[in-house]
Amino acid sequence: MAAMSSASDTGDHRGRHPPERRLLILGGPRSGKTSSANTILGDEMFDAGTETTHSNVGQTEIYGRRVTVVDTPSWAIPADPEDDEEPDTDDNAGAESDSPARPQPSLDSEGPCMGAILCPPGPHAILLVVSITQPFSDRERKAAEEQLGALGGGTWRYCMVLFTGVDKLPKGVFIEEHIANTGETLQWLVERCGSRYDNNLHCMEL
Ligand SMILES: Nc1nc2c(ncn2[C@@H]2O[C@H](COP(=O)(O)OP(=O)(O)O)[C@@H](O)[C@H]2O)c(=O)[nH]1
Ligand SMILES: [Mg+2]
């Protein structure tokens, strides 16, 4: 990917260009990436609720700072190897599965890598969007590792988790409790991001 940017390459802070922040939004299918992009941009700039098959760039100004947001198609969730090993038979067809079916990006989705190219010379931060209403298991972990790996070494240092669906948490339950109770893979993700996380409700306050 284009080199990740440090805060010091945001242009001439004393010069003609307002300082800029470039945000790259990544995540699994229907995790709320486009909705979050719209929330940050303060406008319904992109179509939320329908599949995003190409990366899109939007810009706004927040407190005098130019903010570029790149919304991307979903990363692919790898198939559960057990699904291949134990195909349904007539005997167990329709039985409850431990691995709920995940939505997958459609075949004409270009994948999220192009998004990094759309915010040259690279994003300042990568927001990994995770819906609290969806599972975050080893398959999602693998998808995140593969995607971040494809974007180049060191990208985790620029990542934070952006939780969506937080409005669906039971009243009085905070995101910290959800992270603690959901399982090791979600905790792994948060730790991999240097314990940087927030929720999309806070984005609305930007
Ligand atoms: N309740 C709730 N729904 C959300 C939230 N964020 C997104 N959604 C809904 O989840 C669906 C998928 O959202 P979208 O932004 O298109 O997901 P994307 O495929 O990751 O870009 C849409 O119906 C959104 O309205 C959230 O924070 N809370
Ligand atoms: Mg989308």
Image: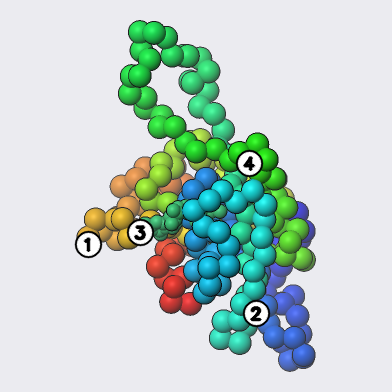
Label 3: how many Cα within 10 Å (few below 14, some 14–19, many 20+): some
Q: Which mark is residue 172?
A: 1
Q: Position of residue 200 (x, y in %)?
A: 44, 64
Type of the residue with mark 1: Gly
For numbered disc 4, what is the local secondary structure?
helix
* Real-space Cα separation, disc 4 to disc 2, in angstroms: 30 Å
Q: Which mark is residue 166?
A: 3
Q: Which residue is labeled 2 in the image?
A: 66
Type of the residue with mark 4: Glu
- Residue at 43% x, 77% y is 205
Tag count: 4
Indicate which label's residue lies in the foreground, 1 or 3: 3
Q: Say whether marks 4 and 2 touch (CB < 8 Å).
A: no
From this view, report whether residue 143 is shown above or below residue 129: above
Label 1: how many Cα within 10 Å (few below 14, some 14–19, many 20+): few
| Beta carbon at label 2 within 8 Å of ligand 2 | no
* Real-space Cα separation, disc 1 to disc 2, in angstroms: 35 Å
Type of the residue with mark 3: Val
For numbered disc 1, what is the local secondary structure?
loop
Asked if residue 115 can be seen in this view, the reply is: yes
For numbered disc 2, what is the local secondary structure?
strand
* Real-space Cα separation, disc 3 to disc 2, in angstroms: 27 Å
* Real-space Cα separation, disc 1 to disc 3, in angstroms: 11 Å
Marked residue nearer the N-terminal end (3 or 4): 4
- 156 left or right, relative to 6: left
